[in-house]
Every structure is written in structure tokens, then in C-alpha cells.
Amino acid sequence: MTTPAGASQPTLLLIDGHSVAYRAFFALPVENFATTTGQPTNAVYGFTSMLLNVLRDEQPTHVAVAFDVSRKTFRSERYVDYKANRAASPAEFAGQVDLIKEVLDALRIVHIEKPGFEADDIIATLATQAPASGLRVLICTGDRDTLQLVNDSVTVLYPRKGVSDLARLTPDAVVEKYLVPPARYPELAALVGETSDNLPGVPGVGPKTAAKWLTAYDGLENLLRQVDSVPGKAGESLREHLSDVTRNRELNALVGNLELGVGVDELARRDWDREAVHSLFDGLEFRVLRDRLLENLPNSEAETAGGFEVSGETLAPGSVRAWLDAHARSGVVGLDFAGQWRAGAGDLTGIALAAADGNAAFIEVTELSPDDDAALAAWLSDPSLPKAVHYAKGPLLALWSRGWELAGLVSDTQLAAYLLRPDQRVYDLADLAARYLHRELSGNAAADDSQAAFDFDDSTSTDAMVRARSVIDLAQELEAQLADQGGTTLLQDVELPLTRTLAVMERVGVAVDLDRLERLRTDFDTAVSQAESAAFEALGHPINLGSPKQLQVALFDELGMPKTRRTQTGYTTDAESLEYLYATTEHPFLAHLLRHRDQIRLRQTVEGLLKSVADDGRIHTTYVQTIAATGRLSSTDPNLQNIPIRTEDGRRIREAFVVGDGYQTLLTADYSQIEMRIMADASEDAGLIEAFSSGQDFHTIMASRVFSVAPDQVSGAQRAKIKAMNYGLAYGLSAFGLSQQLKIEVSEARGLMEEYFERFGHVRDYLAGIVAEARKTGYTQTVLGRRRYLPDLNSSNRQRREMAERAALNAPIQGSAADIIKVAMLDVETALARRSLRSRMLLQVHDELVFEVADGELEELTELVRDKMGHAVEMTVPLAVSVGTGGSWHDAAH
């Protein structure tokens, strides 16, 4: 979209909120846009994306968004069938308009609505007022009624496709498209009718005939005055439907003199609210849009607050010791590292230091003299000299590659920010500096500091020093806030030391059997082809199984299957819908289609593993501490947590993870039913505690209590239902969710939950208490004080409120499980070092730890792991640890 001449003139941008939101909803697949909590965001995303584009391209000086209040307006009172043909909004659209309004509030853009009137009337009023203030007007809408407002000062931006491609409708463009000037467009619409508004036109009269009449008779008023002279069947039809025409013209006339309570001058653009934007975009998981906002619409409030000034230089060879002695022996020193690192190795090129006295330095590690090297190594490894870093784990690998150690780490600003707001999706240094310090990093100083890499050369050493300087200020601010929240101990005693533990695990990696992985890839390739052929045979002809359109034709037209959820492009063919259809119909085509998709996923998993094998024959995954809001660790590049555990194919993949050369066996240890043990301890439910204490199968004992039968009389189906209930409660399971999981009616699921809570009332009270307390305080808390803030618990939006309630149920239990295994990892590592054992910890996956056992250490390691994992925290119901050994990850299962 090009900006027209005269764009420098003050400009008022008016947006029809509902119109654009609805178009955005149908332009973007709802299944591709949702938060991890399940909130659909396709309309919000599309609207916000369009808004940012228009603000960037048009540079308006004034902005407002108009919304409809309801379908009841003076027009519907005048004509009861006005817009009566419109279907109810899709369920996924509900709540998204409210989210759009929250986006506008965060951007400090005025939004207006007027009971009894439509957004078009608000737009017409403001567009009428704008010229008096010297403003040209841009109207972004998908409603053609606004074309009547177009003139030399008013242009309509009309979405051609979705909301990204906007046609610029000027007076000439309107004439070219509709054959009448803008002022006569509503007259043409009165004759032709408007389907979207359910306004029927004159039968047999199309736009060309209507335009010809309006030109010949000089407008609708003259046409109707001389209606008897209009010839032909079209004239007869017009005379028979005069009342429709006059009604249409009355209804499509926009009201331009509303009392809105806000004037044009009050619509001047303001700087957006930085904290509100970050908080909201975190919740909506709009990282890309946030980046676009920061790049294209800078906030002058932050700019005026200034950046970071440093006084320093690149140190000459031989001067490092003197600088460290003069500036880095007192107070916290901020560090920033230049180089490249990945899970298995690292390469360090430079270190920036910012001292507490205001001095800074950049050290090129490739230019160090022997004395420099010794002085820097000693300073880095001195635990008495406090240091602050942003994302320490990656640079640790690079430091180790040079034989250096990092000690005295008192703050990692990435981890501190994560503990403060675990629902954020971005913890880049530049973003945090702007958010918490209201100061901007620019250039290379604002580089993405993910665990991938970033490099500085001579010309940008200043940027590295600026980053180091910002780390000191940011660490101080974050530590103060963390102390207020009681999170200091969690940072200092768990997350910071765990950084080193994870880095060691990443460097060690896990050995794999390459030949077995290659065979698996071949097997899965064959299985994909076989499933495809079988699907074609069941259908009767070949199709592209990856094409939603071809699948829609096959499933709903050819096979006549029940319709799934409707989308803009037809009926959805996502995995959940296909599984539902197969459960309903058991059609062989669906069985083969689902297997085809499953085998493709497995093949992709194996291909990802093969690409990740390093030169040492081992896979070095990367652990991330700042992704899961509950505190769970995440595994990336490759993700070892998504290898199926309970399927035969998943077990075959685990067979490829083997004990490495020089070691005896693998040992796996995991927690048994840790979530339920945490719930029993927290709820103090006597029945739950007794079920664990019985020594019998936990789910069987629980089922026997719920169904009032002896344990040996519990059926497999009954045990399965209670097992789903037991685990589901830790995830905020609803009656609907349980019904979907067990393939039973919602009423039966609700009854099952009621029976469960009747027997275990303290569990019910505990879960209700979690939500009630979080609603008062705004957060949930784990056994170690890990908080998760849930502002939506008090939202007026029912959908968002219910999702927050499920998160509130989930966070304390899942978060406590995460805390416990992290403490166990630290305790195990400490014990391994204290006993000088060669055995080592390789992997952490969910509630499981995997070890490589050195010769002669199996018995001691088993005892050590059981002890440290079993006593990570003390609870009413003791933690149970299961241990297994074997030559492969699969063989070591238990």
C-alpha cells in the first residue's frame, strides 16, 4: 500500500473495529492462532497486524477505532429484518473484540461506541468534524456504506483480501468501480440492495442499471419523482418496490452529528504504554508483532529517558590485569560475552566488563598475553568477586572451551526476569532494559541474545560494553522486585546453580546408535508409503493427504462424514477432528490417514535426531529454563521431550540412545505419580494419603473408593476413568475435558467428578481454595515460592477467566513438580562431585533423569540417586523413585 501525496498533512485514521476484526477472523485460520492456554487470537492478531501496518505506512497524527455495541440500533427498530440474515458469531470469535480493545488501550488509541448506533455513524460524525481541524481522513473498513463519506479529504481503505491488502478508494476510484460519485453510492445501494445488511433491492436491477438511472435522472430523488417515466420491465419492477428503495435509502444514510463525548483533537496519537504492551503481548504470545511494534513505532517516552552511557575502551594486550585491579575488585561487575556457542561447544571472541565505578572495558580474548590470560581466568573463577550476566549458560560452554571457569555469579537477568513474569515470551536484554529501566539499547547492543550466538567486531565493542552496563542496572532493579515477591532464594539456590548443571549436561550429551537411527528412518519412510497406499485404496483414488482442501472433498463430499468445525476454507481437518471422526465412524480411510500423519511425525523426529548428532557421536540438546510458565525445563535442538513414551514406535526411538564408550550402562530414575503426591500433601486429604500408604496400585485403590467396590473387583475401564481423573485434576481438567478424554457424555463425566469429590472432599476444597486465593492475590505459588501471575482470574471475559482458572489449578502442582526435580538434580550433582564418582547425569525429561554409569559405580549411584531424588523435599506422602538400568534408554525403562 503506497502512501498518497499529501501524507504530511495531519491525518485522522478511523477504523471500523468490528468490521476489520471479523475479516481478520476469517482471514487467518483459528487453529493456527491460539495461546498455550487455548485462547483463540486470530482476529486479534490480524487486526493488530493491520493496525501496525497502517500506522507505519500512513503515519496518522490522530487515530480512533469505532465499535458496534450490539445489533439493536435505531435501524433495527425501523426495520426488524435489518441484518437479520447474519449468523451468530463463531464461538472462537467470542471475547476477541474485548482483547482488541485491550490492545488499543495498551497502544493508547481511543476506541468509541454509542448505544443505538453503528460504528459507521461514529466514523461519519468524526469524518464530518475533521476538516474543521485541518485533518484529512482515512477510513479503514470493510463496510461499503462508508463510501458515501469519500471526498477530496476522505479516503476509504477497503480490505481486498483478508486485512493485509487495502484498496485506496478515492472519489475517482469510487466512480471507476461503481459508476457513480461517492455521494450517490448510498442511492445506488438503495436500488440494488445490500445483502450483508439484509436490505432487498429492486428485482432485476443491477449496479449498471442503477448507475445509468441515477446519472440520467440526476439522483435518486429525481428518479423517484419521475418514476412513472422509467421504461421497460426494470421500470415496472422499480415502481412495484418503491417502498423498499425509500426504506433502504433511509437506513443506509449515516448519522454524522452524534454526541460522542470526545472531539477530534482528543484523538491525537500518544506514545503507547510500554508496560501494558509487554504484559498484554506476553499473554497473547505476540512476539513477532511486538518486534514489529518496537521496530516501526518507537516509543518516544523511552527515547527521552536516554540510553546507557559507558566510559571505556578495548584493552590493549598486557593491560588486562591492571584494569581488573583498578576497577573490578569491588561491587558487582556486569559481563557480556561475544562469540558463538551451542549445547556441545563454544567459541569465545570477546568479553565486555562494566564495573560498579562506571568504567567499562572490552577484552579481545584472541589477543591476550599470557599474563592477561592468567589474570582474567583468575578473576572470572574467583567466587568472592560478584558478577552479573544476562543468559549465562551459553557463554559457560565458550569459557570452558578455553579452560576458564565462571564463579561468583550473583545474578542472571534473564532468569530473574523469568521468575518475575514467567508468562512472558521474550527475555531479550534490550526488551527487558526498555521494560524495566525505560531505556533503549540500539544497534548490535539490541541483538537477539538467544542461546544461538551473536558476534561483535572491533567497531561494535562499545555495544558490548553498553550491554554489560545495562546488565548491572537491570540486575539491581530485578533483584529488588524479586525480593519483594520472595523469589530471591529460588533464583540464588535453584535457578542460578542449575544453569551450570544444565551446561554440563549439554556439553556431555548422550550417545546414539547411528545405524539404528538410519534404519528407523528407512522403516518410517516405508510406513509412510504403506499408509498412503492403504488410504488411497480405502478411498478409491489417490489424493494429496497433506492438502486440507482435498481432504475436505474426500471426507465430507465423497465419504459423507459428519461435518467438523467450520472454518473460512471449509471444515477443519486438524488432528483432533480427524481422531473424533475416526472414533465416530471407524472408517478405514481415517485409520490409514491418521497412521500416515503419525509416521510422518516420527520420521521427522528421527531426521531431526540424525541432523543433531555431533562429531563425537552424541546428541547435545539445549535446555531452556525460561519457556514453561510452570517452571518446567524445555529441551530444544533437538527436543528430546517429544519422543513418545508409551507407543511402540517411541520405544524404538529410545532404543537408539545408548551407553557411551567407557561406561557400563545407562540408569533412568523417575518420580512415580509425583503430581498426585504433591496434591495429597497440599490438600491433606486423608483418603488420598491412605491410598498412597496402602502399598497397592494407587489408581485401583482410588477407583475402588469412588465406585464402592473391593480393589479386586475394579474393572479396567473403572481404573482408566479414575486414572484420567487423578492426572487430569493436576491440569485443571473440566467435565468437558474429561468427557473428551474418556469418550463419554459430559453429564457422565460431571457425575464421575462429583462422585470423586464426594469421596475426596479435601481435594475439592484444596482446588477451590487455590483459585479463590489466587483471585485475591493475583498469583499462585509452588512449594519453593515460584509464582505465576494470573490477572485474567478477574477478567469480565468468561472464556479468559475460565482459562486462567485452569492455569491456577495447574501451576502450583506442575510448578512444585518442576521445583522438586530441579532440587534433585542439584543435590545429585553435588553428591557425585563430593564422592568423586565418574558417573554423570545426561538427560532430564519430564520427571525422569538419565545417567551414564561408570564401571563399578552402579550400586553406589543407584543408592545416591534414590536418596537425593526421594528427599529433594519432605512431604506427608514420601516421594517414590523408580530406577532401571540397561544398555539403551529403552532398556533402562522401568
Image (cartoon, helix red, strand yellow):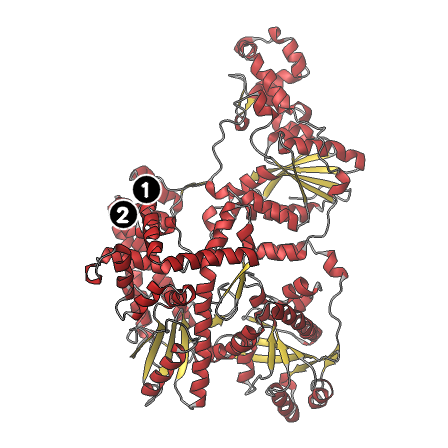
Whether 708 is drawn above or below 44: the answer is below
Looking at this view, name the residue that lies furthest to the bottom: 371
Q: Position of residue 363 (x, y in %)?
A: 67, 82
- What residue is at 61 percent from the left and 22 percent from the top? 251
- Lower position in the chain sequence, tag 1 or tag 2: 1
Circle 2 crowding by C-alpha within 10 Å: few under 14, some 14–19, many from 20:
many
**Quarter of the figure with the C terminus:** bottom left
Circle 1 crowding by C-alpha within 10 Å: few under 14, some 14–19, many from 20:
some
Q: Nearer the viewer, residue 251 or 597?
A: 251
Residue that numbered label 1 is attached to: 554
Report if the CB atoms under discs 1 and 2 are less than 8 Å apart.
yes
- What residue is at 42 percent from the left and 70 percent from the top? 611
Task: Tell me the element at label 2.
Answer: helix
Relative to 630, is 647 on the left or the right? Answer: left
**Quarter of the figure with the N terminus:** top right
Whether 496 is drawn above or below 233: the answer is below
Q: In the image, what residue type sits under mark 2?
A: Phe
Residue that numbered label 2 is attached to: 589
Q: Position of residue 6 (x, y in %)?
A: 76, 41
Whether 42 is drawn above or below 635: the answer is above
